[in-house]
Image: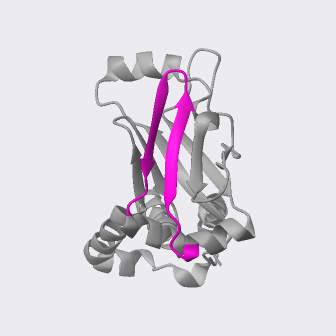
């Protein structure tokens, strides 16, 4: 997938005008990019469109219109776009109740390393996690982690040819797995070359 450049972005004025339609398009697209793993975990797979939306929203919120500031945002979000042989995702532990979340995150230290995806016929792939900064302390893990799953060329070919994809977590405090739905599998296959 190609990285975003200044030319891919709308001006603040134009984005303000098209934002409702663009946002609706992105929200519809994201439906095919989410994989729930049990009741409290989910992977939100990123791509060029999801990152364009993130950059546009940051520029809008921060009122950034100068080239240097725009480039700073691109530098933050471009690394989250898949490179053609991997999947990149925001991994979230989701608990609506604040107290339940606090207790769970204390038990889930290392959960991002226990996360995996598996293309049918191949070994599980554990992610490279939090390349930007460590998100775990000795007392708890973060509810949000940024992960990258590196695939072999053979895995990528199999995924593009329709192989089943599974995702899961094998952690003492949280063990779940799921088969990725066909619409999400097709979307993820589109990230690969």
Q: Quarter holding the N terminus? A: bottom right
Residue 113 is situated, as x and y percent measured from the top left of the image, at 64, 36
Give the image's coloring scheme. Answer: one colour
Taking the view exactly as shown, the residue that stands out farthest to the bottom is 7
Locate residue 139: give its quadrant. top right
Taking the magenta stretch, the answer to whether it contains residue 3 is: no
Question: Residue at coordinates 66% horizontally, 61% vertically from top-left?
Answer: 79
x%, y% of residue 188? Answer: 51, 68
Residue 89 visible from this viewpoint: yes
Residue at 53%, 67% (x, y): give it.
Answer: 163
Percent of width and height locating residue 16? 32, 74
The residue depicted at 45 percent of the width and 72 percent of the height is: 186
| Of 157 and 15, the residue lying toward us | 157
Magenta region = 160-181
Direction from residue 14 to residue 174 in the image, left or right: right
**Residue furthest out toward the front:** 121
- Can residue 67 be seen from the camera position used here? no
Q: Nearer the viewer, residue 147 or 37?
A: 37
Q: Is residue 116 above or below residue 7?
A: above
């Amino acid at each position: 997938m190609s990285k975003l450049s200044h030319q891919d972005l709308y001006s603040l004025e134009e984005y303000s005008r098209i934002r409702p339609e663009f946002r609706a398009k992105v929200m519809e697209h994201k439906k095919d990019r989410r994989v729930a793993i049990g009741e409290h975990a989910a992977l939100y797979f990123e791509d060029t469109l999801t990152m364009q939306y993130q950059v546009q929203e940051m520029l809008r919120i921060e009122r950034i219109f100068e080239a240097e500031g725009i480039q700073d945002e691109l530098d933050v979000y471009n690394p989250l776009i898949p490179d053609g042989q991997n999947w990149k995702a925001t991994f979230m532990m989701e608990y609506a109740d604040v107290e339940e979340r606090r207790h769970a995150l204390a038990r889930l230290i290392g959960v991002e390393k226990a996360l995996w995806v598996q293309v049918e016929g191949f070994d599980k792939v554990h992610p490279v996690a939090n390349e930007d900064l460590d998100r775990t302390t000795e007392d708890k893990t973060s509810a949000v982690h940024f992960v990258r799953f590196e695939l072999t060329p053979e895995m990528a070919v199999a995924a593009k040819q329709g192989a089943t994809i599974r995702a899961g977590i094998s952690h003492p405090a949280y063990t779940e797995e799921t088969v990725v739905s066909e619409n999400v599998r097709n979307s993820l296959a589109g990230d690969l070359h």
